[in-house]
Image (cartoon, helix red, strand yellow):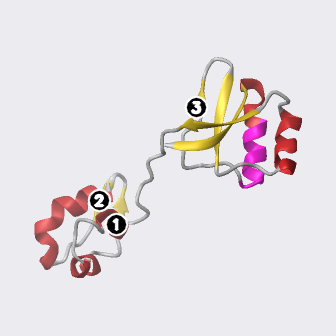
């Protein structure tokens, strides 16, 4: 997916990344692209002149461009989000809200009406 990006030298990439984060410009939904000498940092939009001056102060050779980035896969925040496209609204309402974790084992009490979805629920918990 395409996004605006700041291309910087590898040795100044971390400082520029921190500055972009402070300026709320860093697009954390994409994977940073690196090669032997430079780094492409995805940004949410074109920086203002003042923001660009701050970036150029860190790396005078920085350049602004549009590049293709791979999106970062986002994990669901809870079991309901993980199953919202797989279960009906009434089934989602019946999902257990508490899970006991004992070491590497999750203990869940699945209601009778969802017993046929146990494998699906188990995979969503993982």
Which residue is rendered at x = 22% and y = 70% of the image? 87
User: Which of the labelled discs sits on residue 33, or is there none?
Assistant: 3
- Residue at screen point 20% across, 72% down: 110
Dividing the image into 4 quarters, which one contains the C terminus? Answer: bottom left
Report the residue at 35% width, 73% height from top. 98
Whether residue 56 is in magenta: the answer is: no
Distance from disc 3 to disc 1, alpha carbons, whole Å, reads 32 Å
- Please identify, in this view, whether the residue under mark 3 or under mark 2 is nearer the observer: 3
| Disc 1: which residue | 79
Q: How many marks?
A: 3
- Residue behind mark 2: 124
Tell me where residue 6 sits by quadrant.
top right
The first of marks 2 and 1 along the sequence is 1
> Mark 2 to mark 1: distance in Å?
6 Å
Mark 1 residue element: helix
> Quick one: label 2, few (<14), some, or many (20+) residues within 10 Å?
some
Q: Looking at the picture, how far across and down is residue 114, in whole percent?
A: 16, 73
Q: Is residue 95 above or below residue 66?
A: below
Q: Position of residue 50 (x, y in %)?
A: 87, 50
Q: Do labels 2 and 1 touch, CB within 8 Å?
A: yes
Q: Earlier in the sequence, mark 3 or mark 2?
A: 3
Please report the bounds of the magenta region as a residue range.
15-24
Coordinates of residue 45 in the picture (x, y in percent) = 67, 51
| SS category of the residue bearing label 3 | strand
User: Residue 31 at what x, y percent from top left?
Assistant: 54, 39
Q: Is residue 25 or residue 106 the one in the foreground?
A: 25
In the image, taking residue 13 as reference, residue 85 lies left or right, namely left
Outermost residue to the left:
116
Q: Residue at the spot x=65%, y=39% of the render?
A: 5
């Amino acid at each position: 997916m395409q996004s605006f990006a700041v291309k910087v030298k590898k040795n100044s990439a971390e400082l520029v990344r921190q500055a972009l984060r402070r300026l709320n410009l860093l697009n954390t939904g994409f994977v940073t692209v690196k090669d032997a000498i430079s780094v492409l940092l995805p940004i949410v939009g074109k920086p203002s002149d003042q923001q660009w001056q701050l970036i150029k102060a860190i790396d005078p050779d920085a350049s602004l461009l549009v590049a293709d980035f791979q999106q970062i896969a986002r994990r669901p925040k809870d079991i309901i989000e993980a199953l919202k496209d797989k279960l009906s609204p009434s089934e989602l309402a019946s999902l257990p809200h508490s899970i006991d974790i004992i070491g590497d084992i999750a203990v869940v009490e699945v209601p009778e009406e969802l017993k046929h979805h146990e494998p699906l629920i188990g995979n969503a918990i993982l």
